[in-house]
């Protein structure tokens, strides 16, 4: 898989080198653009200029911010599947998206991998929807994070959403094991394979401090999740808004990273602008494959950004969930899916193709908005 859209003449080789650096890790230092400039043999002004262009003009850069572990911040989080009536999906999505804990929401077309058409003339996902019937009623998928301390917990929220007009069924697919969480489109192809992801136990005292709105670590979380200003000393602005000194902000960031609460501080790239033409949620029955083999395969495949073992149901035996991003054409993506299923000794699975993006945003953690939410029907 190529890492960027080679037809996009607006993206220079310098941009690729820059994105390869900041997509892995953005430096948490007083003069981050100066540090990047030294690695790229240019000036800090050059770095700021290109990142500004990539964010504001090409929209390739979505934002530069911290990536947090929601559970460590006191949130319950889950993937939700909705069987939505086709003529009411837009209205349903509007209500779902009104919850501040929804970060991703997609309308997907589920196809049985054994029925995927092998037709070199296929051009777009809509061609699949006309060739292959929907293999499941669950056609809307979103992620939901709700504070455990909120009056309406995650189960209450789902119960209320399940009552919406046009929702035939709603259910969660809870994580049993996180295998991979790595969304990088410009990283070096020769980088070592990802290592298995894992969650850490958080110090109870630190958990309490995170909920204290006056504590520096709470303020740091609120600040670090904001989009970084593209100025010479950008962390000065974030710190000032949070009522901290820049040094205090860096100290709290270090604590958050060591505790596993802040997974990374990096640039988030728009996958479509990066040349990923296709996005498919691939769920496979891996009951005939060893867990070691599953982990090895998921980590080795650069096309896979997310990998989870999730809760199954009698009518949904597909325990492995992966997100596949593909820059090639549709027939080659179908061939890849079938090859991947074969590598995992799986003859049963669903490829759910993204046909409409209803929501894609970063959650503002530790805000009070989730406490106020009520569905509007």
Image: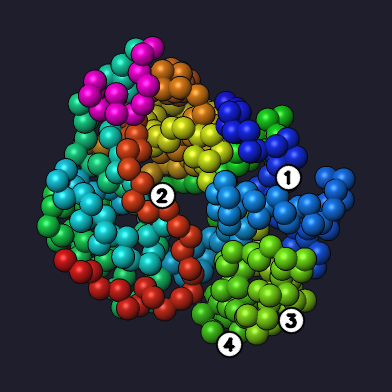
Quarter of the image for residue 68 reads bottom right
Tag 2's secondary structure?
Answer: strand
Q: Give the colouring mode of the picture.
A: rainbow
Is tag 1's residue or tag 3's residue first in the polypeptide sequence? 1
Tag 4's secondary structure?
Answer: loop
- Residue under pointer 3: 245
| Left or right, residue 90 beside residue 349 | left
Q: Give the residue displayed 29% in from the left and 24% down from the top.
A: 127
Return the x and y of residue 358 as percentages of the image width and height. 33, 51
**Magenta highlight on residue 77:** no
Residue 337 visible? The answer is yes
Q: Residues within 10 Å of mark 2 (few under 14, many from 20)?
A: some
- C-alpha gap between disc 1 and disc 4: 37 Å
**Vertical placement of 15 versus 250: above or below?**
above
- C-alpha gap between disc 4 and disc 2: 33 Å
Instruction: Give the label, 3 or 4, closer to the camera.
Output: 3
Is tag 3's residue or tag 2's residue first in the polypeptide sequence? 2
Q: Which mark is residue 18?
A: 1
Is tag 4's residue or tag 2's residue first in the polypeptide sequence? 2
Say if mark 4 contacts mark 2, CB within 8 Å.
Answer: no
Magenta range is 120-132
Q: Which mark is residue 182?
A: none
Q: Residues within 10 Å of mark 1 (few under 14, many from 20)?
A: some
Q: Residues within 10 Å of mark 4 (few under 14, many from 20)?
A: few
Return the x and y of residue 47 as percentages of the image width and height. 76, 52
Q: Specify the quadrant that holds the N terminus.
A: top right
- Residue under pointer 2: 175
Q: Which mark is residue 214?
A: 4
Is tag 3's residue or tag 4's residue first in the polypeptide sequence? 4
Q: Give the residue displayed 59% in from the left and 64% down from the top.
A: 227
């Amino acid at each position: 898989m190529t890492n960027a859209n080679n037809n996009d003449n607006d993206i220079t080789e310098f941009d690729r080198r820059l994105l390869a650096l900041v997509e892995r890790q953005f430096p948490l230092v007083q003069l981050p653009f100066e540090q990047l400039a030294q690695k790229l043999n240019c000036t800090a002004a050059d770095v700021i200029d290109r990142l500004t262009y990539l964010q504001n003009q090409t929209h390739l850069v979505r934002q530069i911010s911290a990536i947090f572990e929601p559970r460590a911040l006191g949130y319950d989080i889950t993937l939700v599947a909705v069987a939505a009536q086709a003529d009411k999906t837009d209205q349903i999505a509007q209500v779902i998206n009104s919850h501040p804990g929804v970060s991703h929401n997609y309308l997907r077309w589920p196809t049985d991998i054994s029925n995927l058409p092998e037709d070199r003339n296929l051009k777009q996902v809509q061609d699949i929807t006309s060739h292959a019937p929907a293999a499941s009623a669950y056609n809307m998928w979103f992620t939901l994070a709700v504070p455990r301390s909120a009056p309406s917990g995650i189960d209450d929220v789902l119960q209320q959403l399940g009552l919406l007009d046009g929702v035939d069924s709603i259910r969660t697919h809870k994580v049993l094991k996180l295998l991979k969480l790595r969304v990088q489109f410009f990283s070096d192809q020769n980088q070592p394979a990802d290592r298995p992801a894992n969650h850490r136990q958080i110090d109870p005292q630190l958990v309490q401090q995170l909920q204290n709105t006056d504590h520096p670590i709470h303020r740091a979380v609120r600040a670090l999740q904001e989009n970084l200003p593209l100025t010479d000393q950008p962390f000065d602005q974030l710190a000032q808004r949070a009522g901290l000194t820049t040094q205090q902000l860096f100290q709290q960031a270090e604590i958050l990273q060591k505790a596993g609460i802040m997974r990374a501080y990096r640039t988030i790239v728009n996958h479509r602008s990066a040349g990923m033409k296709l996005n498919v949620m691939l769920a496979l029955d891996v009951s005939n494959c060893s867990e070691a083999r599953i982990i090895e395969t998921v980590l080795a495949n650069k096309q896979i950004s997310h990998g989870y073992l999730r809760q199954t149901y009698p009518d949904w035996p597909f325990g492995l969930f992966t997100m596949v991003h593909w820059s090639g054409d549709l027939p080659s993506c179908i061939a890849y899916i079938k090859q991947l299923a074969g590598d995992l000794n799986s003859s049963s699975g669903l490829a759910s193709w993204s046909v409409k993006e209803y929501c894609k945003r970063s959650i503002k953690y530790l805000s009070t908005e989730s406490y106020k939410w009520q569905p509007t029907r």
